[in-house]
């Protein structure tokens, strides 16, 4: 009798302790990004991704590179110091050179093409490598948009030759710097969070980003023109800690995957809508917005990539497979 009472009491105590502990035991998903909290991608994560997994996970976003510096997020996930990030092919290329194929100017055609490339069979071994060697799962592809030149200078830009000597800020990795050079400019590495001040003080002559980003962080306040080169249909991957993934049940994993795909789709639609309506916004702000000789840029950029060391790391036949999609 005594023994069974003790057993019942301790079982009860265990239940009392485990229920609250279990409820509080949600997995914490810290996400670090240089983006703002009004960016279409981060809005999609907090309004679509987070609520869909709220039962078992607490999503904790950190914006404006306040938790980790731009470009250090993948390493942070690999070391177990971060659970999620919105990473880029350029950042992955610094670790896995073959990812530089997705950083090449004028390769991806549009948002749909990005989706097809990400879902293609030939992408699987690359995703697997990142998972096995870095402990990072690339859950879904997010659309950032078509990158355009945005300059504080007046001089009209029609061809790559017109960018000679222009100090063009590009994010701080080799793949980004190369794109700046391939466009004909003099690339300057700088973190995203420093670009506004860089433009304001004249430390740089310009930067490149999609129209929604230029509006989101008010680059129009410190620049005079936008040249619609559309030189890179830019993407980001939702990067997720493999260690955390492995700690989830199969049902939870499926929910995380679906939440990521749904968030990516929501962000993509929002970003596409913004891109199509923002030209007028910048004109109203007094900026010149015009299309240069895009063919001249395309030819110049593609030639430089094909002749570069980057292209030597690209898997055999992959450019053709991407073009065929
Ligand atoms: C940028 O630094 O210009 C860039 O657009 C690069 C992207 O890969 C992405 O990281 C983005 O910044 C940030 O998320 C801020 O929007």
Image (cartoon, grey):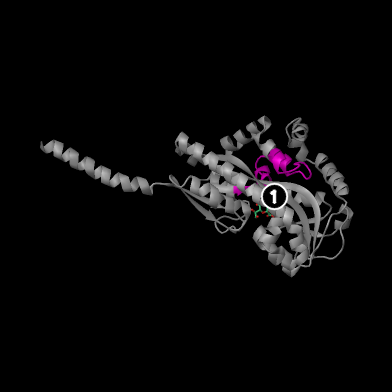
Q: Residue furthest bottom?
A: 201
**Rendered view: 16 above or below 214:** above
Q: Return the x and y of residue 80 as percentages of the image width and height.
A: 50, 46
Point 86% across, 44% down: residue: 299
Horizontal side of residue 73 vs 112, given as left or right = left
Point 57% across, 48% down: residue: 85
Q: Where the N terminus falls, by quadrant? A: top left
Point 80% across, 54% down: residue: 228
Say if disc 1 is inside 8 Å of ligand 1.
no
**Rendered view: 198 above or below 264:** below
The quarter of the picture where residue 126 lies is top right
Horizontal side of residue 3 vs 16, given as left or right = left
| Viewer-closest of 261 and 93 | 261
Considering the numbered disc 1 on the image, is that residue within a helix, a strand or a loop?
A: helix
Can residue 171 be seen here? The reply is no
Q: Residue furthest left?
A: 1
Q: Return the x and y of residue 124 as percentages of the image width and height.
A: 63, 32
The quarter of the picture where residue 157 lies is bottom right
User: What residue does disc 1 label?
Assistant: 272
Is 202 one of the magenta-colored residues?
Answer: no
Q: Return the x and y of residue 300 as percentages of the image width and height.
A: 86, 46
Can residue 299 be seen here? The reply is yes
Q: Which residues are magenta?
A: 86-114
| Viewer-closest of 287 and 240 | 287
Is 105 one of the magenta-colored residues?
Answer: yes
Q: Where the C terminus falls, by quadrant? A: top right
Crowding at label 1, few (<14), some or many (≥20) Cα neighbours within 10 Å?
some
**Rendered view: 44 above or below 286:** above
Point 73% across, 36% down: residue: 313
């Amino acid at each position: 009798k005594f023994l069974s009472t003790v057993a019942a009491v301790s079982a009860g105590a265990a239940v009392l302790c485990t229920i609250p502990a279990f409820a509080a035991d949600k997995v914490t998903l810290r996400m670090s990004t240089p983006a703002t909290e009004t960016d279409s991608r981060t809005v999609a994560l907090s309004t679509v991704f987070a609520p869909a997994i709220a039962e078992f996970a607490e999503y904790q976003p950190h914006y404006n590179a306040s938790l980790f510096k731009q470009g250090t997020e993948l390493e942070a996930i690999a070391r177990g110091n971060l659970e999620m990030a919105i990473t880029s092919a350029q950042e992955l290329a610094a670790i896995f050179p073959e990812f530089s194929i997705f950083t090449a100017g004028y390769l991806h055609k549009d948002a749909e093409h990005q989706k097809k490339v990400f879902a293609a069979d030939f992408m699987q071994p690359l995703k697997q490598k990142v998972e096995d060697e870095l402990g990072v799962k690339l859950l879904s592809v997010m659309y950032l948009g078509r990158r355009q030149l945005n300059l504080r200078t007046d001089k009209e830009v029609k061809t790559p030759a017109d960018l000679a000597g222009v100090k063009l800020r590009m994010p701080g990795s080799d793949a980004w710097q190369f794109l700046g050079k391939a466009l004909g400019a003099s690339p300057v590495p700088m973190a995203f969070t420093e670009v506004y001040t860089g433009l304001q003080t004249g430390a740089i002559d310009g930067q490149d980003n999609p129209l929604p980003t230029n509006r989101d962080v008010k680059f129009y306040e410190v620049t005079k023109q936008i040249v619609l080169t559309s030189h890179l249909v830019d993407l980001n991957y939702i990067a997720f800690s493999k260690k955390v993934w492995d700690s989830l049940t199969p049902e939870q994993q499926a929910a995380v995957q679906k939440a990521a795909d749904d968030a990516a789709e929501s962000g993509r639609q929002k970003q596409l809508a913004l891109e199509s309506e923002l030209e007028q916004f910048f004109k109203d702000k007094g900026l010149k917005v015009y299309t240069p000789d895009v063919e001249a840029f395309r030819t110049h950029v593609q030639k430089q990539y094909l002749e570069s060391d980057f292209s030597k790391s690209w898997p055999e036949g992959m450019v053709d497979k991407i073009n065929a999609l």
